[in-house]
Image (cartoon, grey):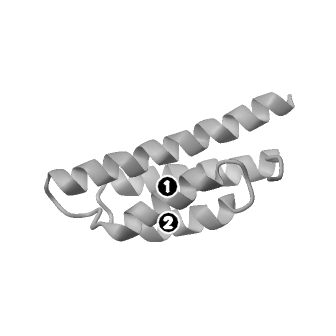
């Protein structure tokens, strides 16, 4: 996998922040935003986290009520945060 450049890190972190906001708001566009973030992450170290978050968001109704949908949203948010942490770790390791 390639190292993360500052530009890629900013773009990916911004995309992931949009995804988290959409998940909190239960916006039905969240799976599409996650798919876009997965494309941004392709080939970068956090790619597995973002790809799994996108897959999970596609498999459930993230805008639904109920404990299963809430648990799925939390899991997707945790994967988004793990991806951001991986980006930060890459940048700090390169410093």
- Give the residue at the far left of this rendering: 66
Q: Secondary structure at mark 1?
A: helix
Q: At which x and y percent is residue 50?
A: 55, 55
Badge 2 marks a residue whose secondary structure is helix
Asked if marks 2 and 1 touch (Cβ < 8 Å), the reply is: yes
State the residue at coordinates (29%, 59%).
Answer: 26
Q: Is residue 13 visible?
A: yes
68 and 12: which is toward the camera: 68
For residue 5, side relative to residue 71 (left or right):
right
Q: Name the side, left or right, on which 43 lies relative to 71.
A: right
Image x and y of residue 6, in percent: 80, 45
State the quadrant of the C terminus: top right
Q: Residue at x 74, y 59 (%)?
A: 43
On the image, numbered disc 1 is attached to which residue? 18
Q: Residue at x 54, y 40 (%)?
A: 82
Q: Give the crowd class for mark 1: few <14, some 14-19, many >=20 residues within 10 Å.
A: some
- Counting labels gives 2
Residue tagged by mark 2? 33
Of badges 2 and 1, nearer the viewer stands 2
Where is 81 relative to 58, above or below? above
């Amino acid at each position: 996998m390639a190292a993360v450049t500052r530009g890629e890190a900013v773009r990916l972190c911004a995309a992931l922040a949009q995804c988290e906001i959409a998940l909190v708001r239960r916006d039905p566009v969240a799976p599409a935003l996650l798919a876009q973030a997965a494309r941004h992450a392709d080939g970068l170290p956090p790619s597995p986290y973002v790809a799994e978050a996108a897959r999970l968001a596609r498999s459930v109704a993230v805008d639904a009520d109920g404990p299963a949908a809430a648990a799925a949203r939390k899991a997707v948010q945790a994967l988004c945060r793990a991806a951001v942490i991986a980006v930060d770790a890459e940048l700090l390791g390169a410093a």
